[in-house]
Image (tube, rainbow, N blue to C red):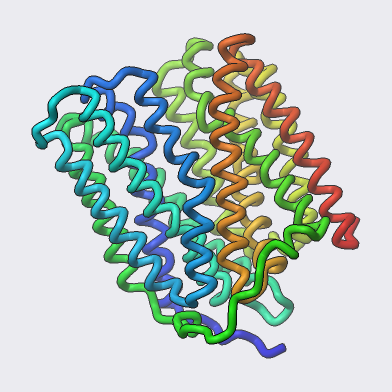
Amino acid sequence: MTAAPQPHVSGLKRFGALTFTYFAAIGLFNPYAPLWFQSLGFSTLVIGAIASLQSWTRIVAPYAWSWGGDHSGRRVELIRLASMGALLSALGLLAVPYLEMPGASELMISVAFMTALLFIANSGVVPLYEALLANLLHTPDGSIDARRYGRVRVWGSVGFILAVTAFGFLLERFGIGIFPAFVAAMNALMLLAALRLPATREDAVHQEAAPPVLPLLRRPEVAWFFASIFFTVLAHTSLYAFFSLYLVSLGYGKGAVGALWAVSVAVEIAFFWTQGRWFGRLSPHGWLKVVAGVTVLRFAATAAGGAWAPVLVLAQLTHAVTFAAHHAACIALVHRLFPGRLRGRGQALYTMLGYGVSGVLGGVGGGWIISQLGFAAVFWAATLSALAGLGCAVLSARASGLR
């Protein structure tokens, strides 16, 4: 096997710019969109329903985008199309409050519709660019250059934390009414970054049919791999959906809540920046098992020790393993298990099962658990989910001939 040509540094910087703008747009929208919806007069139920559209669209849309990329070979063009769709949807959100609406229900439907379109569009960006980046960073032994991948992916974490911080200040200064204008501006920057992506050989249209993905999914190591992703990320939905509410219920102030979130993002950035130094010390399957085991400990500590700030700090420090190392291991395994023109659909399945189906079930199921048993119970449920993820990771490794 011949080594893939090493990507030029400027090419990787362009991928870093896309990663930065995409996650900065997410860092703006996800935390502050509910506040804008509230300013429009929507009820908590309606706000929750609109917010859940992100998880619902992740069930189908990423695979559709990636299927197009695998079959056409035009991944760069599809990223640009997805980015353009996200910008047009954001401009639609900007225009909605100024349209003549017969009533509140029509406003709600219009906002929900444009939000769904935004999620459908931007759900294509990550699996398509991850497949492109994996091709660029392919190594002769069939893996990914971990150091270079980490140096690109870290900009997503930087973009997210900067957006959360900066836009929180700006929205406080100028009012929540300017929120859709900021969303449009961030998606415009993402489109500019997409337009600057380097052309690759994957852009050429293939004459032969792309191979089917179903036979791969029937292989035990692949099936158990995706099961481990599902349960490990399902455990994390308790964090993303309910951690802040849990902290407030325990009497923590907003400053403490923000500081605990900042700790997790800071160690995530540190992991991605330095992963090339030591990520290769374990196999990707080995990392999956370590991640699931640490996730068990993280959420057990969160459930049992939430009243003690030092325990929560230690739990948040494990985010470097339970999120960052998990993401890096999953990308490496998808690259290995879904070669060539299967790679985009492999990335899409990772997004769908990890952040689509699990997001819907975790949000709905977690809400029900909290209503019946309280906040701590949802983190105990996350502990059990992580245990299931550990078992699936072990079975995937065994099916692959590894211990």
| Above-or-below relation of 267 to 361 | below
Residue 382 screen position, x and y as percent: 68, 28
| Above-or-below relation of 228 to 76 | above
Q: Is residue 20 left or right of residue 389?
A: left
Residue 99 screen position, x and y as percent: 11, 36
Residue lying at the far bottom of the rendered structure: 2
Q: Residue at x 76, y 53 (%)?
A: 223
Q: Is residue 230 left or right of residue 351?
A: right
Quadrant of the rendered image containing residue 293 = top right
Q: Residue at x 74, y 64 (%)?
A: 216
| Above-or-below relation of 81 to 324 | below
Marks counted in the figure total 0
Quadrant of the rendered image containing residue 358 = top right
Q: Residue at x 60, y 85 (%)?
A: 4
Q: Residue at x 43, y 68 (%)?
A: 15
Of 27 and 76, the residue lying toward us:
76
Residue 282 visible in image: no
Q: Quadrant of the C terminus?
A: bottom right
Of 252 and 295, the residue lying toward us:
295
Residue 386 visible in image: yes
Q: Quadrant of the N terminus?
A: bottom right
Q: Is residue 179 left or right of residue 313?
A: left
Residue 220 screen position, x and y as percent: 83, 56
